[in-house]
Amino acid sequence: MSDFEHVFEQPPEGAAADWTIPQNWRAYTETEHRTWDTLYARQMQILPGRAADAFMRGLDALDLNTGGIPDFSVMNPKLQALTGWTVVCVPGLVPDEVFFDHLANRRFVSGQFIRRPDQLDYLQEPDIFHDVFGHVPMLTDPDFAAYMEAYGKGGQRAASLGMLPNLARLYWYTVEFGLMKQTDGLRIYGAGIVSSATESVFCLEDASPNRLGFDLERVMRTLYRIDDFQQVYFVIDSIEQLKQQTLQDFAPIYDRLKGADEIAIDAILPTDAVFTNGTQDYARKGGRFAA
């Protein structure tokens, strides 16, 4: 789910009615496979000791370091055996209803393309490295897999109630930019972080961002930014906590949210559980790797 412009309004030529396309793995070039290998190697220098145990276990279970871009026909049987999920290719960003339908049926949509070698550090639209390396390892965890399925089903309902902006914030601050508390400290599980060399360090070690305890309604009221490091990260106690808090009827929550103000991205409320009261220096200096 994204705030980016959709590339298409209807399935383009060659796509199925559900917007899926073949991965066409044999068509990837040597340069594209090398780009995956470069990105993978770089992240594996950074993530041990920073990424959540569940993410690292997922990487091992799927063996995504066999050389080059993973072949979905090899990867999917491993993932399906663990949690019943599969990964499908789509030609670009898809409409919300298509995205939710795939999640509700335990299918995760992935871009087919990979970034160019000159785009290693930043790419606005998610590519196959973000989608597969960033997202798919967490789908090997049964609790997280259940959360994602429930999110898909919840998205279908939120769309009918006009509450998609609030639900999008939940996805953003968990699936994309979530932190988790472990006995050995805060760890990363969000795909937008684990696929970024710079934010993997920034989110845990920089003094700038706020790090706050996860609260469902608070998160669903909080604004976010799509073009730079986050100014706030929300910390879950466990994947089980995330699943339990979200496997409930959201109707009463939506009723309360309709009368609630949005919360500024850098705000700290009296009711927040504060892990870090950030300086916000990075944002004040203009962001995007500010000096």
Image (spheres, rainbow, N blue to C red):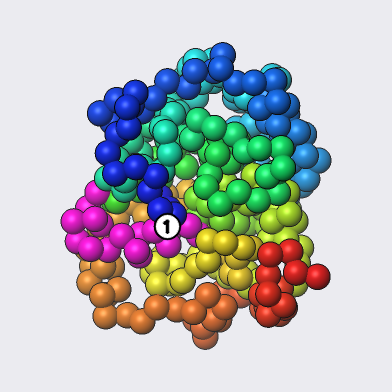
Q: Residue furthest left?
A: 160
Residue 138 position (above or below residue 69):
below
**Which residue is depicted at the point 30% across and 73% down?**
257
Answer with the quarter of the image where residue 40 lies.
Answer: top right
Type of amino acid at the residue the image marks with label 1: Asp
| Place of residue 209 in the rendered image (x, y in percent of width and height, measured from the top left) | 66, 71
Q: SS at mark 1?
A: loop
**Which residue is depicted at the point 19% across and 61% down?**
161
Question: Does residue 285 appear in this view?
Answer: yes
Question: Does residue 275 appear in this view?
Answer: no
| Place of residue 175 in the rendered image (x, y in percent of width and height, measured from the top left) | 50, 50
Answer with the quarter of the image where residue 254 lies.
Answer: bottom left
Residue 120 is a magenta residue: no
In this rendering, would 139 be left or right of 148? right
**Which residue is depicted at the point 57% across and 78% down?**
266
Q: Which residue is mark 1?
A: 3
Magenta portion: prevailing SS class: helix
| Place of residue 246 in the rendered image (x, y in percent of width and height, measured from the top left) | 37, 55
| Place of residue 95 in the rendered image (x, y in percent of width and height, measured from the top left) | 31, 45
In this rendering, would 199 be left or right of 236? right
Residue 111 position (above or below residue 150):
above
Magenta region, residue range = 156-173
Q: How many marks?
A: 1
In this rendering, would 225 be left or right of 205? left
Residue 158 is a magenta residue: yes
